[in-house]
Image: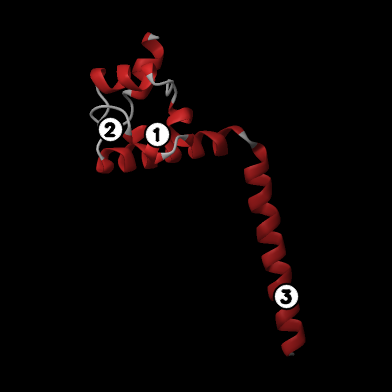
Amino acid sequence: MKSQLKELQELKGIGKVLSHRLVESSYDTIAKVAAASENGLGRIEGMNAHKVQSISAQARKMTGEAEKGHHTWCRENEAVQQQAQDAALKNRDRLKG
């Protein structure tokens, strides 16, 4: 539980008390916070609308960056997109000329 509390405290605005409340409400990882509905998080004591939006955005950003770092398909997908864009530009230029 201690590691879960520390993880949640990485979110700006989440201290000891709110991290305990999040864990007690089954939001024990940043990924679960990212996936949570704002209504669900808003039911937790001490969470106002602004805080809910802030921590949701932070959690989504953190989990998105972690996913990109772990998957090679993201880098491969970027390369494929660049190749497709280059091919489209070549075809456009060829048809113009």
Residue type pointed to by label 3: Lys
Return the disc, 3 or 2, that comes first in the chain's sequence: 2
> Which of the 4 quarters of the picture holds residue 21?
top left
Towards the viewer: 30 or 46:
46
Q: Which element is circle 3 on?
A: helix
Q: Which element is circle 2 on?
A: loop
x, y (%) of residue 33? Answer: 42, 31
- The residues bearing labels 3 and 2 have C-alpha atoms spaced at a distance of 47 Å
The residue shown at (66%, 60%) is 82
Residue type pointed to by label 1: Gly
Mark 2, other Cα within 10 Å: few <14 / some 14–19 / many ≥20: few
Q: Compared with residue 80, is residue 51 higher up or lower down, i.e. above or below?
A: above
Left or right of residue 43, residue 60 in this image:
right
- The residues bearing labels 3 and 1 have C-alpha atoms spaced at a distance of 50 Å
Q: Which element is circle 1 on?
A: helix
| The label number, if any, that marks residue 90 in the structure image | 3
The residue shown at (68%, 74%) is 89
What residue is shown with label 2?
12
The residue shown at (51%, 33%) is 66
Q: Please state, as top left, top right, bottom left or bottom right, where the N terminus lies in the image.
A: top left
Left or right of residue 11, residue 77 in this image:
right
User: Which-is-in-front pick, marks 3 and 1?
Assistant: 1
> Which of the 4 quarters of the picture holds residue 18?
top left
x, y (%) of residue 6? Answer: 34, 17
